[in-house]
Amino acid sequence: MNWVQMIEDRFLVWRFNRGDPAALCRIYEKYRDSLLKEAAALLNDRAGVEDVLHDVFVEFARSVGRFELRGSLKGYLAICVANRARDLNRMKRRRNAVDLDEVPPRAADGIGPEQAAMSREMVARLDAAMAELPDEQREIVVLHVQSKLPFREIARLREISINTAMSRYRYGLDKLRSILNGELGS
Amino acid sequence: MSDRKDMKRMVETYLGSLETPAGDRVDEKVLPAALTAMHKAKPPMALASHSIWRTIMTSKAGKLTAAAAVAVVVLFAVVDSFTNPVWAIEQAIEAVKEYRAIHITGTIPGRTFESWMRANKSMTQSQDVVARDSNGGIAWVKNGSTYLYDPGPNTVFFENAITQGFSQWLGPEFLETFAKAQGAQVLQGKDPATGRDRVTLLCSLVDVDGPQSWTVVFDVASKLPVSYTCWHNLDRSGEPVCDSTRITYYKDLPDSLFDVHIPGDPAYVEKPLAIAEENIDLLSNPDDGLPTAGLTPQEAAEKIVRTTYQAVIDGDLATLRKLSPLCRNWDDEMLRSILLRTGKSDRIAQIVQIGPAGKTGESSLGALIVMPSVLRRGDNTKIEEKMIVQFRMIEDKSSCVVYGPYGISRVLE
């Protein structure tokens, strides 16, 4: 994120804390698409994507007047989405509702233009592989690759060392590769 | 699978391809809930706002109704800037200065209206305003706030500023400023209906309400303005936004005329802060304004407003135009007459207090902040004025400019 964006965010947060609804709308519009993608990448059941965004923004809105921005707003919201997605995944698991064979073909319904080079089969395999990653590895892969958060910021937001963040990212990629190569099977 | 870089690339492609729900559908689910949550959790300073999220959800038709009702009286908030020196108006001045109240009737697009206005006791500016249109819309001013009832959504839109009425009451000062209008023309003729002699003033300007043009008709015998027409462009083209057909003058009016009671239980919604988008280009010159690097929004807004008022006090027109670009539309004489009030007892003589920042909003250029100021005039009266500060990011540099006043000034003592 460039400094211009950072300045705009600080300004938006300042206005938000003063109760300006337009500021909240602008924050939402600015990060909606990126957060939706992140939620879609982190949830085992993609039907919950809207719920994640709803819960994150309602909670954020409740902090009006006392919200303190440390670091980037994008990073803060991305972590909130990751936390909420993790909660929903756990709830699903507890209900024994997650059976990878029953996970809807997440990208198969609509393959975007960026995916032209990726087959439906590969998408389905990646869906399954992502779902197999431990939460902490999956989050860091998504936050770094999808949300473009630097490891330093992820480490700060997750309260872990930067080495741990980088290790989890490497382990995550390695495990994905192993799964896709059939070394672990899925 | 070769190495991590390849894997990362594959994950990137995969993540980029993920389908997400349609934005509109998500907006409908998330935004109202978030705005409602924000409203309920608002800090005490913002509790005066009611159901703010509905402002954003209000129908276009509702907004049009509101705008039309406002147009009834907005015009006189800006008319305090015109005249032509060749037109002898001294007699007109004498004619109007005794009247403390007026009644205006006319049309706005799609409806008729009537408006009542009354000056404050010292006859310096309007104090009470009520305007009603034939569709049930009502605009009024009370205790320093402006209200607008829109019967469609049964909603009262309000703002904590006096945005309707005369910044200067009809009288010597008001009419004298007509004489300073840039490019104003005066036509003399007869009213075809009555055969009475009349004088028509044509003028135009760009101010905080965007580009406008006017015709104001004066009856020669009574020396009183008897009608006016206003367009939201500079060349009086197309349908006017307001066409008054009759202005009646009163020495005073009963208080009860200005009491407004809305039946039922309307919602109260704070009107969002906005500026005329037609003026955005004028605010976009990178050489204008004040850099804001290293300053908080509060500090930047305070600094530019303080510097602007100091320029007014010092008569520094170059600084005034640089900090408040809309002033570029006005020539030196007009600026001295309208803003600097050179030689007048009500000129601004001292800055008593700037800030703290008030209402905020947004234009297509960036954030807006209202910065209230307490000022002392040359006649020792204290007033409150509110200035809108526009923040902008041009060529990767952040800066701000003064847009203009938010409503008319309020006499404090």
Image (cartoon, coloured by chain):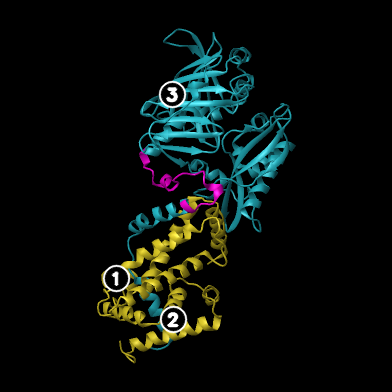
Chain colours: A yellow, B cyan
Instruction: Between residue B199 and residue B76, name the one nearer to us.
Output: B76
Query: Badge 3: few (under 14), some or many (20 or more) residues near its Cα, within 10 Å?
Result: many
Instruction: Between residue A183 and residue B143, name the one nearer to us.
Output: B143
Chain letter of the residue carrying label 1: A
Check if mark 1 and mark 3 are on a common chain: no
Q: According to the image, label 2 marks what residue?
A: A137
Quadrant including the C terminus of chain A: bottom left
What's the residue at 60%, 57% (across, down)? Answer: B397
Instruction: Between residue B257 and residue B22, name the one nearer to us.
Output: B257
The magenta span reads B40-61
| Left or right, B409 with reference to A180 | right
Query: Badge 1: few (under 14), some or many (20 or more) residues near its Cα, within 10 Å?
Result: some
Instruction: Between residue B138 and residue B90, name the one nearer to us.
Output: B138
Q: Which label was assigned to residue B243?
A: 3
Residue ranking furthest to the bottom: A183
| Left or right, A179 with reference to B317 | left
What's the residue at 51%, 43% (across, down)? Answer: B48
Where residue B63 sits in the image (x, y, percent)?
Answer: 40, 39
What's the residue at 42%, 83% (across, down)? Answer: A172
- The amino acid pointed to by label 1 is Ile
- The amino acid pointed to by label 3 is Asp
What distance separates the C-alpha of mark 1 from that of mark 3?
57 Å
Secondary structure, mark 1, is loop
Q: Is residue B54 magenta?
A: yes
Q: According to the image, label 1 marks what residue?
A: A111
- The amino acid pointed to by label 2 is Gln
Where residue B99 sits in the image (x, y, percent)?
Answer: 57, 15
